[in-house]
Image (cartoon, rainbow, N blue to C red):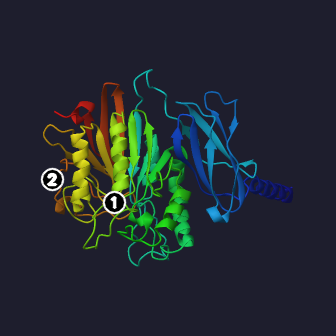
Amino acid sequence: MKKLLMLLGLLLYNVSLLASGPGIKSGPMLGYSEMRESIVWIQTEKDAKVEMEYFDIENPKIKFRSNIVKTDKTSAYTAKLVADKVEPGKKYEYKILLNDKQVKFDYPTILQTPKLWQWREDPPSLRIAMGSGTFINEEKYDRAGKPYGGGYEIFKSIYNIKPDIMLWLGDNVYLREADYYSRTGVINRYTHVRSLAEMQALLANTHNYAILDDHDFGPNDSDRGFVGKEMTMDVFKMFWANPSYGFQDMNAAVTMFSWADCDFFLLDNRSFRSPNNRKTGERVILGEKQKQWLFDNLAYSKAKFKFVVMGGQFLNSAAVYENYACYPEERNEIINFIENEKIEGVIFISGDRHFTELSRLKNSNKPMMLDFTSSPLCSGPVKDACSKEVNTNRIDGTCFNERNFGVIEVSGKLKSRQIKFITYDSNGKLIWEKSFLESDFKAE
């Protein structure tokens, strides 16, 4: 009898392995979501047929299927599955089918679509999580000494607050010396980071949007002179599911999306950046084409809040490291454009600096601008940043130099919207919060 039970158990185990197919390496991860289309990214362990089934959680009897993708080595076994039968303002449960067998996860898998509120009702509330600096240790490729990464519980803390979207503010992976110059190295680094167990529930239930910074683009402080930039850009596109990449003839990590009454402009601060060490020539971060794209989109936007998302700080007045203050001509041109055009509700969102702070710029008779810097998630913090760096635009009480993540909450009636900026530590403990009214951004 005992042998029979053992054989039965072994049989059931083998059947479960067959039902799981070749297995999931990382994901699923929710990418962009629009009112009538949403996308789910996933990475398998080897060649596989991947498909998604999904249904409105309020009407589970009607099921839909995504496109079918056959993953292979050339694409790092990644797939992007499109839900094209969704409707606005709905939540859908989704199932991943691997070689026609459903894969089980120990957390929910729910996607949502933005609500169609225009001309009908007040805009919905929105909760945005964010952070930069995701260093996941891998001893054989890391520098000797104390591990630079840690505090991976932060991703569970972010998941627990149930954000609608997550903004990855650059340095989302840290390419190492062994990775820089080969596609194999870059793919392995992305795969290593994306496979982190603590990250999976967040990826599967929050819509993720990403920009890149130097450690995603190449070596530390890399710029347009980095020879491997096209390769790292290709892998960035492979592992993220943004709405688009670049515009016109520009191959870049640039895109835009809307949610509620908020517009998000995701910028590329590396592909066109002039080398820091050049003694002659232009000194720019965005470059002329990208800058004009931003100007046109800000002028066109009707959103109450316009989020300009970039890797490095914009409003910090200290001309140190890679702050925009080190590029004064282009920085002043952007500020002058926003002020002279009287564009209200502009908020810069930045990372990179290994500490967090909120900066404010308010010139007489001009619209107020804010810059929410959120860093680092699980790389090393700069312990003395708050005491040593003099930022005349810093709002008192907002500098924090431990691992943390940021949250922005937008709420209120159509003509009286409110926005709250919040910083939490790795364990989800509230560090500080600051609130503003829609009217605070207006020119006097």
- Per the image, label 2 sits on a secondary structure element best described as loop
Mark 2 Cα shell of 10 Å, populated few (<14), some (14-19), many (≥20): some
Q: Which residue is mark 1?
A: 352
Residue 94 in the image, given as x and y percentages of width and height = 63, 41
Image quadrant where residue 347 sits: top left
The amino acid pointed to by label 2 is Thr
Mark 1 Cα shell of 10 Å, populated few (<14), some (14-19), many (≥20): many
What quarter of the picture does the C terminus occupy?
top left
| Residue 118 drawn above or below residue 47 | above
Residue 260 in the image, given as x and y percentages of width and height = 42, 33
| Residue 229 drawn above or below residue 438 | below
Image quadrant where residue 126 sits: top left
Q: Which residue is mark 2?
A: 392
- Per the image, label 1 sits on a secondary structure element best described as loop
Camera sees residue 198: yes
Q: Residue at x 39, y 69 (%)?
A: 148
Residue 184 in the image, given as x and y percentages of width and height = 57, 71
Q: Give whichever of 408, 268 is nearer the camera.
A: 268
